[in-house]
Image (cartoon, helix red, strand yellow):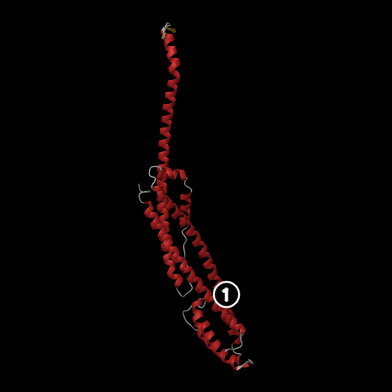
Amino acid sequence: MTFQFGDFYYSGSPKDYWTIIGIFLGPIVSVIISISVFKASAIKEKKKDDERLNILKIQIANYLHLLEDNITIQFNNLLKILPQIKEKKVIDYDLKVSYEINYYAIKLSEINQIDLYKIFIEKEASNLDKLSRIQEDIDLAKNMVEFLIREYKLFNERDIQCQSLYNNSISEIGKFYNNLSGSLDKLNIGSKERDFLISFNLIYNKFVSIKDKDFKDIYVSNDSLIKELRNSYNTNSPNFPFLDNLILDCEYSFRDLEQYKKDFRKYLIFTIRAFLKIKLSMIDNSKGLIDK
Protein backbone atom coordinates (compact mmCIF):
# COMPACT_ATOMS: atom_id res chain seq x y z
CA MET A 1 0.00 0.00 0.00
CA THR A 2 1.44 3.39 -1.05
CA PHE A 3 0.42 7.00 -0.67
CA GLN A 4 0.31 9.04 -3.90
CA PHE A 5 -1.40 12.26 -4.88
CA GLY A 6 -3.14 12.57 -1.53
CA ASP A 7 -4.61 9.02 -1.44
CA PHE A 8 -3.68 5.42 -0.53
CA TYR A 9 -3.16 2.81 -3.26
CA TYR A 10 -2.91 -0.90 -2.67
CA SER A 11 -0.07 -2.45 -4.68
CA GLY A 12 0.33 -5.84 -2.93
CA SER A 13 -1.24 -9.30 -3.29
CA PRO A 14 -4.87 -10.12 -2.28
CA LYS A 15 -3.50 -12.14 0.62
CA ASP A 16 -1.78 -9.10 2.01
CA TYR A 17 -5.00 -7.13 1.54
CA TRP A 18 -7.03 -9.44 3.78
CA THR A 19 -4.23 -9.48 6.31
CA ILE A 20 -4.44 -5.72 6.60
CA ILE A 21 -8.25 -5.85 6.81
CA GLY A 22 -7.89 -8.37 9.60
CA ILE A 23 -5.46 -6.14 11.46
CA PHE A 24 -7.97 -3.30 11.40
CA LEU A 25 -11.20 -5.25 11.95
CA GLY A 26 -9.91 -7.94 14.36
CA PRO A 27 -10.04 -5.82 17.51
CA ILE A 28 -13.44 -4.41 16.55
CA VAL A 29 -14.91 -7.87 16.01
CA SER A 30 -13.42 -9.02 19.31
CA VAL A 31 -15.04 -6.10 21.09
CA ILE A 32 -18.39 -6.83 19.42
CA ILE A 33 -18.18 -10.49 20.38
CA SER A 34 -17.21 -9.58 23.96
CA ILE A 35 -20.13 -7.19 24.19
CA SER A 36 -22.51 -9.83 22.85
CA VAL A 37 -21.22 -12.42 25.31
CA PHE A 38 -21.48 -9.90 28.16
CA LYS A 39 -25.05 -8.99 27.20
CA ALA A 40 -26.01 -12.64 26.93
CA SER A 41 -24.44 -13.35 30.31
CA ALA A 42 -26.13 -10.29 31.84
CA ILE A 43 -29.51 -11.35 30.46
CA LYS A 44 -28.98 -14.86 31.82
CA GLU A 45 -28.00 -13.51 35.27
CA LYS A 46 -30.94 -11.10 35.25
CA LYS A 47 -33.31 -13.93 34.43
CA LYS A 48 -31.77 -16.04 37.19
CA ASP A 49 -32.05 -13.16 39.69
CA ASP A 50 -35.66 -12.47 38.64
CA GLU A 51 -36.54 -16.11 39.27
CA ARG A 52 -34.84 -15.93 42.69
CA LEU A 53 -36.71 -12.74 43.59
CA ASN A 54 -40.01 -14.24 42.45
CA ILE A 55 -39.45 -17.28 44.68
CA LEU A 56 -38.49 -14.95 47.55
CA LYS A 57 -41.66 -12.89 47.02
CA ILE A 58 -43.78 -16.06 47.29
CA GLN A 59 -41.87 -17.00 50.45
CA ILE A 60 -42.45 -13.53 51.93
CA ALA A 61 -46.17 -13.79 51.17
CA ASN A 62 -46.25 -17.21 52.84
CA TYR A 63 -44.44 -15.91 55.94
CA LEU A 64 -46.84 -12.97 56.20
CA HIS A 65 -49.93 -15.20 55.91
CA LEU A 66 -48.54 -17.56 58.58
CA LEU A 67 -47.72 -14.58 60.80
CA GLU A 68 -51.28 -13.27 60.42
CA ASP A 69 -52.70 -16.73 61.22
CA ASN A 70 -50.63 -17.00 64.40
CA ILE A 71 -51.61 -13.49 65.48
CA THR A 72 -55.23 -14.65 65.14
CA ILE A 73 -54.47 -17.75 67.24
CA GLN A 74 -52.85 -15.58 69.93
CA PHE A 75 -55.74 -13.11 69.79
CA ASN A 76 -58.33 -15.88 70.30
CA ASN A 77 -56.36 -17.45 73.16
CA LEU A 78 -56.19 -14.12 74.98
CA LEU A 79 -59.94 -13.67 74.53
CA LYS A 80 -60.44 -17.12 76.07
CA ILE A 81 -58.34 -16.46 79.16
CA LEU A 82 -59.63 -12.91 79.78
CA PRO A 83 -62.84 -13.93 81.61
CA GLN A 84 -60.89 -16.52 83.65
CA ILE A 85 -58.78 -13.74 85.19
CA LYS A 86 -61.95 -12.07 86.41
CA GLU A 87 -63.41 -15.17 88.06
CA LYS A 88 -63.49 -15.31 91.85
CA LYS A 89 -61.77 -18.65 92.19
CA VAL A 90 -58.35 -20.21 91.81
CA ILE A 91 -57.75 -21.34 88.23
CA ASP A 92 -54.82 -22.90 86.43
CA TYR A 93 -54.62 -20.37 83.64
CA ASP A 94 -53.95 -21.92 80.26
CA LEU A 95 -52.38 -19.01 78.42
CA LYS A 96 -50.71 -20.31 75.29
CA VAL A 97 -48.08 -18.00 73.84
CA SER A 98 -47.68 -18.23 70.07
CA TYR A 99 -43.91 -18.38 69.73
CA GLU A 100 -44.45 -18.85 65.97
CA ILE A 101 -45.12 -15.11 65.79
CA ASN A 102 -41.54 -14.44 66.80
CA TYR A 103 -40.27 -17.15 64.44
CA TYR A 104 -41.91 -15.68 61.34
CA ALA A 105 -41.17 -12.11 62.43
CA ILE A 106 -37.46 -12.99 62.68
CA LYS A 107 -37.56 -14.78 59.32
CA LEU A 108 -39.06 -11.69 57.67
CA SER A 109 -36.62 -9.33 59.38
CA GLU A 110 -33.68 -11.36 58.06
CA ILE A 111 -34.61 -10.74 54.41
CA ASN A 112 -32.07 -8.55 52.61
CA GLN A 113 -33.22 -4.94 52.28
CA ILE A 114 -31.88 -4.70 48.72
CA ASP A 115 -34.00 -7.68 47.73
CA LEU A 116 -37.05 -6.05 49.31
CA TYR A 117 -36.33 -2.92 47.31
CA LYS A 118 -36.04 -4.88 44.05
CA ILE A 119 -39.24 -6.85 44.69
CA PHE A 120 -41.55 -4.14 45.95
CA ILE A 121 -40.17 -0.65 45.41
CA GLU A 122 -37.96 -0.56 42.30
CA LYS A 123 -40.89 -0.61 39.87
CA GLU A 124 -43.37 1.19 42.12
CA ALA A 125 -41.96 3.69 44.60
CA SER A 126 -45.40 4.17 46.23
CA ASN A 127 -45.02 0.73 47.81
CA LEU A 128 -42.37 2.12 50.15
CA ASP A 129 -44.95 3.39 52.65
CA LYS A 130 -46.86 0.09 52.68
CA LEU A 131 -43.68 -1.94 53.11
CA SER A 132 -42.50 0.34 55.92
CA ARG A 133 -45.81 -0.03 57.77
CA ILE A 134 -45.74 -3.83 57.37
CA GLN A 135 -42.21 -3.90 58.79
CA GLU A 136 -43.37 -1.77 61.74
CA ASP A 137 -46.29 -4.18 62.33
CA ILE A 138 -43.92 -7.16 62.25
CA ASP A 139 -41.59 -5.56 64.81
CA LEU A 140 -44.54 -4.59 67.01
CA ALA A 141 -46.00 -8.13 66.90
CA LYS A 142 -42.64 -9.57 67.92
CA ASN A 143 -42.32 -7.09 70.79
CA MET A 144 -45.89 -7.78 71.96
CA VAL A 145 -45.14 -11.51 72.24
CA GLU A 146 -41.97 -10.79 74.23
CA PHE A 147 -43.89 -8.44 76.55
CA LEU A 148 -46.67 -11.03 76.93
CA ILE A 149 -44.18 -13.73 77.94
CA ARG A 150 -42.60 -11.41 80.49
CA GLU A 151 -45.89 -10.12 81.94
CA TYR A 152 -47.47 -13.57 82.16
CA LYS A 153 -44.39 -14.94 83.92
CA LEU A 154 -44.46 -12.03 86.38
CA PHE A 155 -48.19 -12.49 87.01
CA ASN A 156 -47.74 -16.21 87.71
CA GLU A 157 -44.88 -15.52 90.11
CA ARG A 158 -47.01 -12.98 92.00
CA ASP A 159 -50.01 -15.31 91.98
CA ILE A 160 -47.96 -18.16 93.47
CA GLN A 161 -46.33 -15.85 96.01
CA CYS A 162 -49.65 -14.44 97.24
CA GLN A 163 -51.33 -17.81 97.49
CA SER A 164 -48.32 -19.32 99.23
CA LEU A 165 -48.25 -16.62 101.91
CA TYR A 166 -52.03 -16.81 102.26
CA ASN A 167 -52.12 -20.60 102.61
CA ASN A 168 -49.24 -20.59 105.09
CA SER A 169 -51.19 -18.19 107.27
CA ILE A 170 -54.34 -20.31 106.94
CA SER A 171 -52.28 -23.33 108.02
CA GLU A 172 -51.05 -21.46 111.11
CA ILE A 173 -54.61 -20.45 111.94
CA GLY A 174 -55.54 -24.13 111.74
CA LYS A 175 -52.74 -25.01 114.15
CA PHE A 176 -54.01 -22.31 116.52
CA TYR A 177 -57.46 -23.92 116.38
CA ASN A 178 -56.05 -27.42 117.02
CA ASN A 179 -54.04 -26.24 120.01
CA LEU A 180 -57.08 -24.47 121.38
CA SER A 181 -59.46 -27.43 121.04
CA GLY A 182 -60.72 -28.71 124.38
CA SER A 183 -58.66 -26.34 126.50
CA LEU A 184 -60.76 -23.17 126.42
CA ASP A 185 -62.02 -23.63 130.01
CA LYS A 186 -58.50 -24.11 131.29
CA LEU A 187 -57.13 -20.88 129.83
CA ASN A 188 -56.48 -17.96 132.15
CA ILE A 189 -57.65 -15.15 129.85
CA GLY A 190 -59.82 -12.07 129.98
CA SER A 191 -63.48 -11.85 128.93
CA LYS A 192 -62.67 -10.26 125.55
CA GLU A 193 -60.26 -13.04 124.69
CA ARG A 194 -62.70 -15.70 125.89
CA ASP A 195 -65.60 -14.23 123.88
CA PHE A 196 -63.41 -14.06 120.77
CA LEU A 197 -62.19 -17.65 121.16
CA ILE A 198 -65.74 -18.90 121.49
CA SER A 199 -66.59 -17.04 118.28
CA PHE A 200 -63.37 -18.31 116.69
CA ASN A 201 -64.36 -21.92 117.41
CA LEU A 202 -67.79 -21.48 115.87
CA ILE A 203 -66.41 -19.75 112.76
CA TYR A 204 -63.67 -22.32 112.18
CA ASN A 205 -66.00 -25.30 112.73
CA LYS A 206 -68.47 -23.82 110.28
CA PHE A 207 -65.67 -23.27 107.75
CA VAL A 208 -64.35 -26.84 107.86
CA SER A 209 -67.88 -28.25 107.61
CA ILE A 210 -68.52 -26.64 104.23
CA LYS A 211 -69.21 -29.37 101.69
CA ASP A 212 -68.03 -29.55 98.09
CA LYS A 213 -65.58 -26.70 98.59
CA ASP A 214 -61.88 -26.50 97.86
CA PHE A 215 -60.40 -25.25 101.11
CA LYS A 216 -57.17 -24.40 99.30
CA ASP A 217 -59.09 -21.95 97.15
CA ILE A 218 -58.22 -18.52 98.47
CA TYR A 219 -61.70 -17.21 97.63
CA VAL A 220 -63.45 -19.93 99.65
CA SER A 221 -61.45 -19.36 102.82
CA ASN A 222 -61.43 -15.59 102.44
CA ASP A 223 -65.23 -15.36 102.41
CA SER A 224 -65.98 -18.15 104.88
CA LEU A 225 -63.12 -17.74 107.35
CA ILE A 226 -60.94 -14.64 107.13
CA LYS A 227 -63.73 -12.09 106.78
CA GLU A 228 -65.64 -13.71 109.62
CA LEU A 229 -62.55 -13.81 111.87
CA ARG A 230 -61.79 -10.17 111.12
CA ASN A 231 -65.32 -9.09 112.05
CA SER A 232 -65.16 -11.08 115.28
CA TYR A 233 -61.68 -9.79 116.13
CA ASN A 234 -62.71 -6.17 115.58
CA THR A 235 -65.89 -6.69 117.61
CA ASN A 236 -64.21 -8.31 120.64
CA SER A 237 -60.77 -6.62 120.44
CA PRO A 238 -58.87 -9.52 122.05
CA ASN A 239 -55.17 -9.41 122.78
CA PHE A 240 -53.98 -12.01 120.30
CA PRO A 241 -51.40 -10.15 118.14
CA PHE A 242 -50.11 -13.41 116.66
CA LEU A 243 -53.55 -14.33 115.34
CA ASP A 244 -54.23 -10.75 114.28
CA ASN A 245 -51.03 -10.79 112.16
CA LEU A 246 -52.05 -14.07 110.53
CA ILE A 247 -55.42 -12.59 109.58
CA LEU A 248 -53.64 -9.48 108.27
CA ASP A 249 -51.28 -11.61 106.17
CA CYS A 250 -54.29 -13.30 104.58
CA GLU A 251 -56.03 -9.97 103.97
CA TYR A 252 -52.94 -8.37 102.39
CA SER A 253 -52.23 -11.44 100.26
CA PHE A 254 -55.80 -11.56 99.03
CA ARG A 255 -55.83 -7.82 98.32
CA ASP A 256 -52.52 -8.00 96.44
CA LEU A 257 -53.66 -10.97 94.37
CA GLU A 258 -56.84 -9.18 93.38
CA GLN A 259 -54.82 -6.13 92.35
CA TYR A 260 -52.37 -8.24 90.32
CA LYS A 261 -55.27 -9.91 88.55
CA LYS A 262 -56.88 -6.58 87.84
CA ASP A 263 -53.64 -5.14 86.44
CA PHE A 264 -52.95 -8.23 84.34
CA ARG A 265 -56.48 -8.18 82.96
CA LYS A 266 -55.99 -4.56 81.88
CA TYR A 267 -52.75 -5.57 80.22
CA LEU A 268 -54.49 -8.44 78.40
CA ILE A 269 -57.18 -6.08 77.09
CA PHE A 270 -54.47 -3.73 75.82
CA THR A 271 -52.63 -6.66 74.19
CA ILE A 272 -55.79 -8.03 72.54
CA ARG A 273 -56.51 -4.63 71.01
CA ALA A 274 -52.89 -4.30 69.88
CA PHE A 275 -52.85 -7.69 68.13
CA LEU A 276 -56.15 -6.91 66.41
CA LYS A 277 -54.80 -3.55 65.22
CA ILE A 278 -51.58 -5.20 63.96
CA LYS A 279 -53.46 -7.85 61.98
CA LEU A 280 -55.86 -5.38 60.36
CA SER A 281 -52.95 -3.11 59.46
CA MET A 282 -50.98 -6.00 57.92
CA ILE A 283 -53.97 -7.13 55.85
CA ASP A 284 -54.63 -3.60 54.65
CA ASN A 285 -51.01 -2.85 53.69
CA SER A 286 -50.52 -6.26 52.04
CA LYS A 287 -53.24 -5.52 49.52
CA GLY A 288 -51.70 -4.61 46.17
CA LEU A 289 -48.25 -5.39 47.52
CA ILE A 290 -48.08 -9.14 48.19
CA ASP A 291 -51.05 -10.17 46.03
CA LYS A 292 -49.76 -8.55 42.85
Q: Nearer the viewer, residue 214 or 34?
A: 34
Mark 1 — residue?
Answer: 165
Q: Callout 1, which amino acid?
A: Leu
Tell me if residue 126 comes above or below residue 145 in the rendering.
Answer: above
Q: Quadrant of residue 20?
A: top left
Task: Residue 148: give x, y in percent of width and height.
Answer: 49, 62
- Based on the displayed image, in which of its 4 quarters is residue 35 positioned? top left
In this rendering, the count of numbered labels is 1
**Residue 166 to residue 290: above or below:** below
Q: Position of residue 279 (x, y in %)?
A: 40, 57
Question: Which residue is located at x 51 percent, y 80 percent?
Answer: 222
Q: Position of residue 157 (x, y in %)?
A: 55, 68
Image location (x, y in percent) of residue 259: 50, 73
In the rendered view, tell whether residue 204 sits above or below residue 23: below
Most extreme residue toward the front, as rendered?
6
Q: SS at mark 1? A: helix
Q: Which residue is at a point 38% across and 57% down the rendered structure image?
A: 280
Q: Is residue 53 left or right of residue 215?
A: left
Quarter of the image where the N terminus is located = top left
In front: 200, or 192?
192
The 10 Å Cα crowd at callout 1, few under 14, some 14 to 19, many 20 or more, is some
Q: Residue at x 56, y 71 (%)?
A: 161
